[in-house]
């Protein structure tokens, strides 16, 4: 197929391209993706000469899963439309959940407020000003029961963005499901439970890496035994990308963290095929359309190879990189916010062309505030238009075979692999994080990008190009400041009404378990059932594990 | 007499973990010749004021993307005043709705920089504002 191609290209360059370039130079001396990968003028079969279709691309639902994890992909079932939502009290968020389900959303995704994410009750001094701000405030299983009131947990799948206290929120979810009469073994959903990226990008850590990894592994182990349909972890590149890393780094750092979790579970004595099929992933979808599609395909192939070759997985499901995608919050502009609808549509399209299993589309007003109901509806409709009108869901991995895309896929895979080798040489991702290596790489990339924008080497519409004078936007969502007071009052009532002795005993049992080596999910579940609060449970663990302090930065 | 370089404390009050902007601004100010200290995450207003005093800074830059700015930025200004640091220039950035800015200014936050602000504008603002204050005193 490529015979004579080199000569033909040479002829074209000399006789057709050359004269045009002389008269009309190109817009830039070189073109790169937003991550800095070079893009050539033209891709031809020469660029994919080394690609072996059966070895590198293959068929969907089969190793190495480059074309997708399901044999029918979206012809069988569309991706799950899952909008991340949560603000104020459990009552308000429950109302938003019902609204989203009525609008045709197909899965739930819970955003918790920061005090919940770092294990403080709403009445803790550090919670001041933060209660209900970026998500829903959950202090005890009673809040959790309100959060899911009227939602049949046996039939909906729920994703929970919770990390350091993942075991506690998972236990609350299980307890609420049991109260609804649902068998835990049938529960479907995901806990993020990915602590490593918290140290480098997201910041909601509580404990030092050692005990944190133990808790992560406890959840993986517990789920493999008791919640077989539950994704025990969602290994996330999203937040590292938001913090400024490149597409290649996003793949590399995410998979390096994943390797660390797999090793931890194996050290626990778990067989790889006993838990690996319930590992899930979470990626960003940024604005560079081609690079992002290639990124998803590269990540799938690389993970399949790692699981098979490095960890000796035999079950194909252990090798499948199943992932959730969220469009890039950091690509949204506060300027001319309506333009964000277009950005999100492009990103969502790339995620679908990249084969995502579920998708959150950002709302146009998220560079300004939490999303309003109208903005969320447009974001959800964007997914529905892609799903039902655009036609791209009708055939599998339609961009496979594109010289450009296959070449980019290969390039991202190779560069990510090189990073992973480097991290391996440092002793793995925990060591790389402790040395500040990952943090530094992310910061360097973020700064490089910012300077490119300031020098106008990269144009962002409305920010450094095509600016216009604007009135401040209206119709933004306001979180009711009364929520903090309501949570405090509810906590007071809970503490007065519950069986104090049972709580104390449950916390003492948890403390003893934490001092030992057993799985902590069962004693946490007991504490949750006894109406212990999230803060009490986390304080008990803080007493045993201590707290993480970030090394002096900069 | 040669003036000492401008000293800036970049701080993350509250529980918010988004520090991309804080770090980028810190680096840009440093590249512009200022001396910059970054507190890291999860600082209480009292801790921020104590660091500002200890480091003898001219400017405190606060970053929050969690919505807690309404409560926490004014608290930082109060804590600085309690330590006798009423001359310190306090500025802020993050996801801050336009409607919140008048209240923050009334509370003593001199300027708020939203998403998309070029770091060069922050540098320029700090230089001009400190110069103005120097002349006035």
Image (spheres, rainbow, N blue to C red):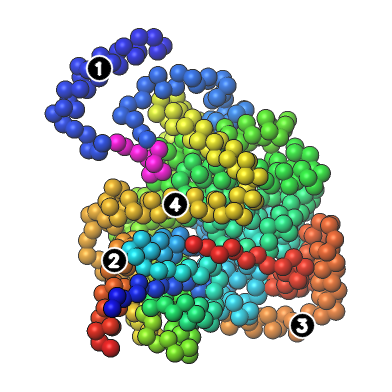
Nearest to the observer: residue A343 or residue A149: A343
Nearest to the observer: residue A316 or residue A429: A429
Residue at 34 percent across and 14 percent down: it is A6
**Principal secondary structure, stretch drawn in magenta:** loop
The tag on residue A177 is: none
Measured in 3D between alpha carbons, the distance from the residue under mark 4 to the one under mark 3, in whole angstroms, is 52 Å
Q: What's the magenta region?
A: A30-37
User: Which residue is identified by label 4?
Assistant: A444
Residue density around tag 4, few if under 14, some if 14–19, many if 20 or more, within 10 Å: some
Measured in 3D between alpha carbons, the distance from the residue under mark 2 to the one under mark 4, in whole angstroms, is 21 Å
Disc number lying in front (4 or 3)? 4
Residue density around tag 2, few if under 14, some if 14–19, many if 20 or more, within 10 Å: few
Nearest to the observer: residue B90 or residue A463: B90
Q: Earlier in the sequence, mark 1 or mark 4?
A: 1
Element type where label 3 sits in the image? helix
Q: Earlier in the sequence, mark 4 or mark 3?
A: 4
Q: Which chain carries label 3?
A: A
């Amino acid at each position: 197929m490529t015979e004579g191609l080199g000569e033909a290209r040479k002829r074209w360059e000399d006789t057709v391209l050359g004269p045009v370039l002389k008269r009309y130079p190109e817009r830039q001396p070189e073109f790169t993706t937003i991550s800095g990968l070079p893009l050539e003028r033209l891709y031809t079969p020469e660029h994919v000469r080394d690609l072996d279709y059966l070895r590198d691309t293959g068929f969907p639902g089969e190793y190495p899963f480059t074309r997708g994890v399901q044999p029918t992909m979206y012809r069988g079932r569309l991706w799950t439309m899952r909008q991340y939502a949560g603000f104020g009290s459990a009552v308000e968020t429950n109302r938003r959940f019902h609204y989203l389900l009525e609008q045709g959303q197909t899965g739930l995704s819970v955003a918790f407020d920061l005090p919940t994410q770092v294990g403080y009750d709403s009445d803790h001094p550090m919670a001041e000003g933060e209660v209900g701000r970026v998500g829903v405030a959950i202090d005890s299983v009673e809040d959790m029961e309100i959060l899911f009131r009227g939602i049949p947990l046996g039939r909906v799948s729920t994703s929970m963005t919770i990390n350091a206290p993942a075991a506690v929120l998972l236990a609350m979810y299980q307890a609420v499901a049991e109260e609804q009469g649902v068998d835990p073994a049938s529960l479907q959903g995901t806990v993020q439970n990915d602590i490593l990226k918290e140290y480098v990008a997201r910041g909601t850590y509580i404990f030092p890496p050692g005990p944190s990894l133990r808790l992560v592994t406890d959840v993986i182990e517990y789920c493999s035994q008791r919640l077989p349909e539950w994704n025990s972890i969602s290994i996330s590149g999203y937040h590292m990308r938001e913090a400024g890393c490149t597409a290649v780094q996003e793949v590399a750092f995410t998979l390096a963290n994943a390797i660390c979790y797999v090793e931890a579970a194996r050290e626990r004595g778990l067989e790889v095929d006993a838990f690996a099929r319930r590992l899930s992933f979470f990626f960003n979808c940024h604005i560079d359309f081609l690079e992002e599609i290639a990124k998803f395909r590269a990540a799938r192939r690389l993970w399949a190879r790692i699981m098979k070759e490095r960890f000796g997985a035999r079950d194909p499901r252990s090798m499948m990189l199943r992932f959730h995608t969220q469009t890039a919050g950091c690509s949204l502009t506060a300027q001319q916010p309506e333009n964000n609808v277009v950005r999100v549509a492009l990103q969502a399209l790339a995620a679908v062309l990249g084969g995502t299993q579920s998708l959150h589309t950002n709302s146009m007003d998220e560079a300004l505030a939490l999303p309003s109901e109208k903005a969320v509806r447009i974001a959800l409709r964007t997914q529905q238009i892609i799903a039902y009108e655009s036609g791209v869901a009708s055939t599998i991995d339609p961009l496979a075979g594109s010289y450009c895309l296959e070449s980019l896929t290969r390039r991202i895979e190779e560069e990510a692999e090189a990073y992973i080798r480097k991290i391996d040489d440092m002793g793995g991702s925990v060591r790389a994080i402790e040395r500040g290596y990952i943090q530094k790489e992310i910061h360097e990339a973020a700064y490089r990008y910012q300077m490119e924008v300031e020098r106008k080497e990269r144009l962002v519409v409305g920010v450094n190009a095509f600016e216009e004078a604007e009135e401040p936007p209206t119709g933004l969502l306001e979180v009711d400041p009364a929520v903090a007071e309501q949570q405090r009052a509810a906590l007071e009532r809970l503490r007065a009404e519950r069986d104090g002795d049972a709580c104390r005993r449950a916390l003492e049992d948890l403390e003893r378990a934490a001092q030992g080596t057993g799985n902590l999910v069962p004693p946490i579940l007991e504490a949750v059932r006894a109406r212990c609060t999230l803060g009490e449970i986390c304080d008990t663990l803080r007493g045993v594990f201590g707290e993480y302090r970030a090394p002096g930065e900069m | 007499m040669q003036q000492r370089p401008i000293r800036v404390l970049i701080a993350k009050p509250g529980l918010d973990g988004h520090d991309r902007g804080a770090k980028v601004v810190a680096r840009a100010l440093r590249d512009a010749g200022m001396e910059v200290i970054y507190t890291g995450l999860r600082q209480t207003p009292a801790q921020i004021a104590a660091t500002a005093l200890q480091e003898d800074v001219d400017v405190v830059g606060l970053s929050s993307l969690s919505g807690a700015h309404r409560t926490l930025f004014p608290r930082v200004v109060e804590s600085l005043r309690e330590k006798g640091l009423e001359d310190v220039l306090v500025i802020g950035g993050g996801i801050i709705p336009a409607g919140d800015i008048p209240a923050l200014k009334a509370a003593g936050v001199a300027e708020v920089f939203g998403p998309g602000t070029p770091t060069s504008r922050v540098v320029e603002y700090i230089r001009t504002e400190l110069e103005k204050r120097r002349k006035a005193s």
